[in-house]
Amino acid sequence: MALRVGVIGGGQLARMMIAPAVELGIDIRVLAEGDGMSAQLAATAVGDYRDLATVRAFAADVDVVTFDHEHVPQEVLRALVDEGVAVHPGPDALRFAQDKLDMRARLADLGVPQPEWAAVRSSDDLGAFLAAHGGAGVVKTPRGGYDGKGVRVVRAADGADDWFAQLGPGEALLVEELVPFVRELAQQVARRPSGQIAVYPVVETVQRDGVCAEVIAPAPAAGDRLAQVASEIGVRIAEGLGVTGMLAVELFETDDERILVNELAMRPHNSGHWSQDGAVTGQFEQHLRAVADLPLGATAPRAPWTVMVNILGGPQDATIDERFDAAMSAHPDAKIHTYGKASRPGRKVGHVNATGDDLDDAVYTARAAAAHFD
Ligand code: ADP
């Protein structure tokens, strides 16, 4: 019988696991949040991922449980593990992708380079941190943030009063120094339960309005030292936290060539979409191999450069189908991926990968194909 992998969450990340699952002979099943989700094709169940009975029933029919997002509550995950379900990544690792304060404390224990940070519970705490860090900081809600939501640059002690007012007993906000980064990078690593690790080349990520817009693989002008440092950080975190599956480490590169960890994702990640068409083993296939404890695939680039450009929903009148037609016919050398989602301004509805020997050509092709959807 084929190995059954259950993915909790029906978004585009689950959707993009479907094709490699078919190729690997894996029976993939998805617990979707509702009807008509991006991963509808493999949705064998619909229900609330916060409800233990729902998740337990879904898990009963699969060999391994994994995720499209990190929002399944710890209590649910721990109950599954206690009942003998294979959950990858497991709750002991996933908590560091669920809570940014837990992550900062754990990375400090591991000696991983990161921005200066503190847990703050009041404007007095925040004021003290700002005074010690040049008057500016980045305040983050520890849980539930994505695409820049729950992240705010503050320059005054009262700059997060609305968030402090919402804290429950014992809760805190995270504040970090405002890092003067020259660019953002991401390091992907895959790790199997049995310990095998595969490391991808470090990539450059470009964000606009807190949302990933483009990725260049490998990161331009990344010398051996930078690539080595990023790779060592990725491996240290994957091993130190016991991550299983894909790990994405978002990084800042500073003007004095330091690399600092921003945050972690323990699943395929937007910064790794380039690998679908640009690496021997794409991150979605690699995630399945890793969580199923199958031998990992090679991570070498297939071309000198791969550029990924996200397609964000726009106000344009033309239907998605017409835009695809135009983009495909104008750019037959671009790989256009669609998430089957309704287009709304700013919503990620697809992405384009372009590969080639020349970086400028790849940037042009990926941007021009994605521009058909503006
Ligand atoms: P999210 O969970 O929404 O992805 P992040 O923690 O990755 O939030 O922050 C979103 C963006 O905000 C980052 O990609 C970066 O551009 C900026 N940012 C976050 N933390 C800092 C920091 N300490 N210093 C400077 N910029 C930051």
Image (cartoon, rainbow, N blue to C red):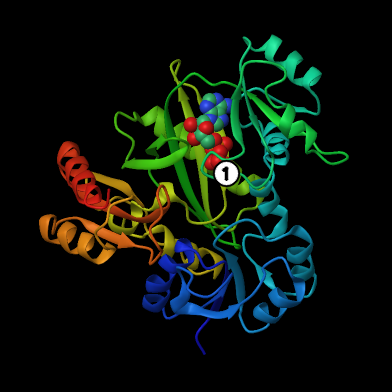
Crowd band around label 1 with a 10 angstrom C-alpha radius: few (<14), some (14–19), many (20+) = many
Q: Look at the numbered disc 1 and give the secondary structure of its residue.
A: strand
* Front residue of this view, candidates 353 and 120: 120
Q: Is residue 155 above or below residue 327?
A: above
Residue 177 image position (x, y, % from top left): 61, 21
Residue 265 image position (x, y, % from top left): 56, 49
| Three-letter residue code for mark 1 | Leu
* Front residue of this view, candidates 314 and 153: 314
Counting labels gives 1
* Front residue of this view, candidates 307 and 219: 307
Q: Can I make out residue 260 in this image?
A: no
Residue 240 in which image quadrant: top right
Q: Is residue 297 above or below residue 80?
A: above
Residue 18 in which image quadrant: bottom left
Residue 97 image position (x, y, % from top left): 63, 48
Q: Can I make out residue 5 in this image?
A: yes
Which residue corresponds to mark 1? 264
- Residue at image position (70%, 10%) is 132
- Residue at image position (40%, 76%) is 24
Left or right for 176, reference 22: right
- Residue at image position (65%, 48%) is 144
Label 1 within 8 A of ligand 1 by Cβ: no
Image quadrant of ligand 1?
top right
Left or right for 274, reference 6: left
Of all residues, the one furthest to the right in this rendering is: 169
* Front residue of this view, candidates 256 and 101: 101
- Residue at image position (57%, 20%) is 178
Of all residues, the one furthest to the bottom in this rendering is: 1
